[in-house]
Image (tube, helix red, strand yellow):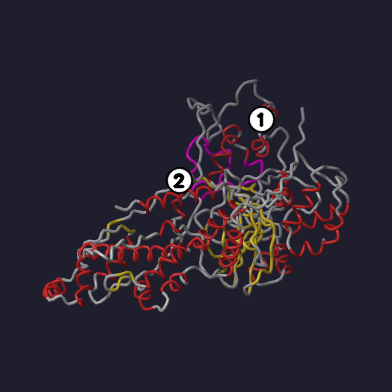
């Protein structure tokens, strides 16, 4: 009884790359079989020399494992998880040192004389009675400023709120324009009856207002620089060193500025990507946030060239609305000539192909759900605004200046971009992690390009995906040409006790045309073992939805990316590969790489594009926003 096995190049993904196995002997149960769930066929082909029944487990010496239960639950390595967002702790500002004893004593004498010049000092005494909560950094900045009796009040003069305060409050009321929530920075102006003032009550209210507004201004500056939420508290897939924001000079600068509101607003990021998001947000808010007409395209299957459908009219209308200005100009004749027919004719096919190409979709004229989402805008204005709010928050987690030379990987777009001299010089399709093996969101620096790489199999894959097979057939990895080491010593796969711990076991695939990482990998060392690499499985790049790997980033044109980061030519990269030898080349200068996750992001022309939230992460950011606003609103 003989079975024909598929070639290794068609094996399914098992890690950052494709699991590419060399041809297996007849009856061998390949990892491809295991991943695709082809159990029924393989159960009958393993151990053909045994009597019917379950396979006998074997130990390191090839003998029976005796009392060990082969049906005992297999161990599993779990990936990161999403958390219930825990907001930062708010503490009461220590106001005990805000009243200088010397000043307070002098005030008593002056007050008795009725000298109006005593009011600021009296207010400073009441400032010590104010109660405001803030995070530790804001509290520290408040205590530093108001604890120094030489610093005057910022927002109050005499017995009233000054113009500086009004300008600051106007700026805080407009923070929605930069993707923040005005509710996080609201301060109520003191309600003082000028006709019947109670001096003590008035001063208490004014000093409470003084401290509250200062706390909100400091909170805004901190939020707009680093983001209002801590990304590392969203999930284990987020990995950022949160920015430190120097709040010490903020109140002094606001006090000295001729326009406090302008100074406060100036603290928001002003990089080109953030400015593009901000402009898009303003445009959508001006469009009334979602009251625009929505175009609906109802297709249950695929619409192919030559077909007919009553949805052709909506398709043409949608492209006319959501296509770029360039596309509308190039296709003006087709758009104008359409008379409402239902035939998917060649001219309409060409229109659709142009639209697909513009949106990074497969430009084949076949209309599926990905094309429909792009044609209909994918989102209402309201949902686009939400994506922009999330994107502007996430942009704050990255450096404000991404640099003149960097690589940006945007997972929801399934694209990688190489920028040099501040311009995009290269872009390509990528495959990123599937929903169960998500690619992380972090930034790092590219250091090395490795040619003809070994593929070191992660422990998670050894345990979760290889171990079930290895317990049935310890020779499995030997048959496939993998190298196995225990405590750094090369051993045969069959000699390993696969019922024991695998912590000291390493498995790797030697360089070859079938290697899971293909010809090369581009390394930016990180704790997640994520990198960019080639793959022998090219068919995935033809798909519109490319969340298909075990977490690493597969490049559709790895030679071009390697040449870019090395500052060399594609021909030189080809020579390095042609040597057949495993070797690494350091990049001349480390290059920032942003392994990002933006469902709204501007393209090279500054036009904001929207993408599906493939991992559902935006919802977790929204929940963190809500929790933060609720916590901040819980004042005494």
User: Residue at image x 78%, y 42%?
Assistant: 302
Q: Quadrant of the N terminus?
A: top right
State the SS at label 1: helix
Q: Nearer the viewer, residue 420 or 24?
A: 420
* Magenta-highlighted residues: 477-504
User: Residue at image x 66%, y 30%?
Assistant: 39
* Label 1 – label 2 distance at C-alpha: 35 Å
Tell me if residue 262 comes above or below residue 607 in the rendering.
Answer: below
**Left/right of residue 441 with respect to residue 256 in the rendered view:** right
Residue 48 drawn at (x, y percent) = 68, 26
Q: Which residue is mark 1?
A: 39
Where residue 365 is drawn, which disc sits there?
A: none
Say whether residue 290 is visible. Answer: yes
Residue 500 within the segment the image draws in magenta = yes
**Left/right of residue 343 with respect to residue 201 in the rendered view:** right
Say whether residue 446 is visible. Answer: no
Residue 498 within the segment the image draws in magenta = yes
User: Residue at image x 62%, y 37%?
Assistant: 475
Q: Which residue is mark 2?
A: 83
């Amino acid at each position: 009884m003989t079975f024909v096995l598929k070639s290794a190049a068609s094996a399914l993904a098992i890690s950052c790359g494709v699991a590419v196995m060399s041809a297996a002997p007849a009856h061998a149960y390949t990892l491809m079989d295991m991943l695709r769930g082809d159990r029924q066929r393989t159960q009958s082909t393993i151990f053909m020399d045994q009597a019917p029944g379950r396979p006998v487990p074997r130990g390191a010496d090839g003998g029976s494992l005796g009392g060990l239960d082969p049906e005992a639950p297999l161990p599993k390595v779990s990936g990161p998880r999403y958390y219930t967002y825990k907001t930062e702790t708010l503490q009461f500002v220590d106001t005990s040192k805000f009243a200088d004893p010397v000043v307070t004593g002098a005030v008593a004498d002056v007050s008795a004389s009725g000298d109006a010049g005593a009011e600021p000092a009296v207010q400073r005494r009441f400032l010590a009675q104010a109660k405001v909560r803030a995070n530790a950094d804001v509290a520290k900045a408040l205590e530093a400023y108001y604890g120094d009796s030489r610093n005057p009040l910022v927002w109050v003069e005499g017995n009233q709120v000054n113009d500086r305060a009004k300008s600051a409050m106007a700026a805080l009321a407009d923070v929605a324009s930069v993707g923040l929530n005005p509710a996080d920075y609201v301060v109520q102006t003191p309600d003082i009856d000028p006709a019947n003032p109670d001096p003590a009550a008035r001063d208490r209210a004014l000093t409470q207002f003084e401290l509250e507004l200062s706390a909100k201004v400091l909170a805004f500056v901190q939020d707009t620089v680093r983001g209002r939420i801590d990304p590392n508290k969203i999930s284990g897939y987020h990995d950022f060193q949160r920015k430190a924001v120097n709040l010490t000079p903020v109140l002094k600068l606001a006090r000295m500025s001729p326009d406090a509101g302008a100074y406060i607003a100036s603290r928001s990021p002003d990089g080109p990507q953030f400015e593009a998001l901000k402009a898009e947000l303003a445009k959508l808010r001006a469009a009334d946030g979602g009251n625009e007409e929505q175009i609906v395209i109802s297709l249950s299957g695929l619409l192919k060239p030559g077909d007919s459908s009553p949805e052709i009219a909506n398709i043409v209308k949608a492209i006319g609305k959501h296509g770029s200005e360039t596309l509308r100009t190039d296709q003006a004749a087709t758009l104008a000539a359409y008379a409402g027919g239902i035939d998917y004719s060649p001219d309409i096919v060409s229109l659709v192909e142009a639209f697909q190409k513009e949106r990074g979709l497969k430009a084949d004229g076949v209309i599926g759900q990905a094309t429909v989402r792009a044609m209909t805008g994918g989102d209402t204005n309201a949902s686009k605004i939400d994506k922009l709010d999330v994107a502007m928050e996430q942009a704050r987690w990255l450096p404000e200046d991404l640099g003149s030379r960097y690589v940006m990987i945007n997972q929801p777009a399934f694209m990688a971009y190489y920028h040099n001299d501040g311009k995009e010089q290269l872009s390509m399709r990528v495959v990123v992690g599937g929903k169960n093996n998500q690619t992380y969101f972090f930034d790092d620096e590219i250091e090395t390009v490795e040619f003809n790489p070994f593929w070191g199999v992660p422990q998670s894959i050894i345990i979760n995906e290889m171990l079930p097979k290895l317990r049935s057939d310890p020779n499995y990895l030997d048959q496939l040409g993998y190298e196995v080491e225990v405590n750094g010593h090369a051993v045969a796969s069959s000699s390993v006790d696969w019922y024991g711990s695998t912590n000291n076991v390493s498995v790797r695939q030697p360089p070859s045309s079938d290697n899971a990482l293909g010809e090369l990998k581009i390394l930016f060392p990180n704790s997640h073992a994520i990198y960019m690499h080639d793959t022998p499985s090219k068919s995935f790049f033809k798909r519109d939805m490319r969340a298909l790997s075990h977490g690493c980033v597969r490049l559709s044109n790895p030679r071009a990316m390697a040449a870019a980061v090395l500052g060399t030519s594609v021909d030189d990269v080809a020579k390095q590969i042609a040597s057949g030898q495993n070797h690494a080349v350091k990049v001349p200068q480390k290059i920032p790489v942003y392994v990002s996750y933006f469902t709204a992001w501007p393209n090279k022309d500054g036009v904001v594009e929207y993408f599906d939230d493939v991992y559902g992460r935006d919802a977790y950011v929204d929940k963190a926003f809500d929790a933060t606003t609720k916590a901040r609103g819980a004042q005494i």
